[in-house]
Amino acid sequence: MAIANTVIQLKKSSTTGRTPVSLNVGETALNYADGKLFYLNSSGTVSYFYGQNNGPSFATANANGTLILTTVANDTLSFNPGNNIVITGNSTSKSVSITLSNNITVSGNITTGAGVGGNITGANNIYANTFIANSPTSTVYVTQSQLVQDTTNTYNHLYTLGLFSGNTDQSIQIGGQNFANTQNSSTDLALYNNLGTDTNNYIDMGITSAAYNVVLNNFTASQPGDGYLYANGSNLIIGTYTPGTNLKIFVGGYNSSNVVANFNAPNTASSSNTTGALTVRGGIAATGNVYANSIYTNGLYYAANGNPISTGGGSITLSDSISSNSSANAATSNAVYVAVSTALAFSIALG
């Protein structure tokens, strides 16, 4: 017996986005506009399959806690760049790159982990109210050189919390500037020991503002606009380490003619007005006593009244009076002025 062709028709719709309200178990429905075949799953909920080439480009995306669901066939997930963010897609590698175009502004904190993956690397600027590097090996490196060997050497220093390097024909500077011109303003570099506070146990190098009030700040050794270096709560040690070097002080310029004092190695003998542990270019004035094993002069001694004293080529004894091998004696009122060219043996040379 021949069986007539039987056509089975499903519930169907040609309206985009239309879904069946309810289905029975085993019953199906087709939306051929969307390419969806609906059925009733084991939970009693209407679900669907996509037809070929009609599936979604993504199913569900989690954007910082917000779920983005596909709703229609060929739904597209878009990445929209924010402020100074550049998003680049590569259709060949099927990848997305997110980079910075310039600066990035963050209202909260940026926290990174340890290792290479925890670094923030960029060619532009990072601005922050507070920058905290908090780990036993935290270090801040800044280099302006693009040479590989310079970049490598920037890291080759022990015990550094921060290091700045460059490679330029000009000077590189670590600068600080206080633009306030008030009676208390200054710019300072302060280093503290383990007991250091804002008032003790530190060394300070700085410069006062043009309007600095030295009386108000109890700093009358200074004047407005002066630079200074001092230690609080400890000794201040200044010197050189390498044998054969010396310490120079210059005034009024930084040419050799402006060097007013040279400090040489201890016990350097003084055989002229240019040799000794300390050589001074110019005169020395003292309000106290001057002691020396021997005093030599190529010129004259002067009494307190300004009159020259002749020693007759002999020796001179510093006391209440001056005596020599000759008969010349003069009262000095406990003071003697050494003029022209005087040298203190093993101690000081005056030029």
Image: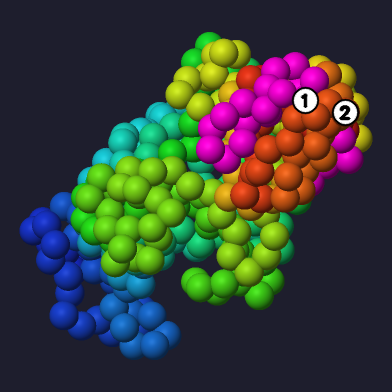
Considering every residue shown, the one lying at the far bottom of the view is 43
* Image marks 2 and 1: residues in contact by CB distance under 8 Å: yes
**Does residue 181 appear anywhere in the picture?**
yes
Q: Nearer the viewer, residue 267 or 219?
A: 267
Return the x and y of residue 24 as percentages of the image width and height.
28, 84
Q: Which residue is under mark 2? A: 325
Q: Main secondary structure of the magenta part?
A: loop
Q: Nearer the viewer, residue 194 or 239?
A: 239
Q: Which residue is under mark 1? A: 311
**Does residue 241 appear anywhere in the picture?**
no
Residue located at (31% from left, 70% from top)? 66
Amino acid type indicated by mark 2 = Asn
Q: What is the span of residues highlighted in magenta in the rendered image?
A: 291-312
Q: Is residue 43 magenta?
A: no
Judging from the image, what secondary structure is the residue with disc 1 in?
Answer: loop
Relative placement, left or right, of 281 versus 12 is right
Relative placement, left or right, of 217 versus 327 is left
Q: Please tell me whether residue 203 is drawn above or below residue 164 in the rendered image.
A: below
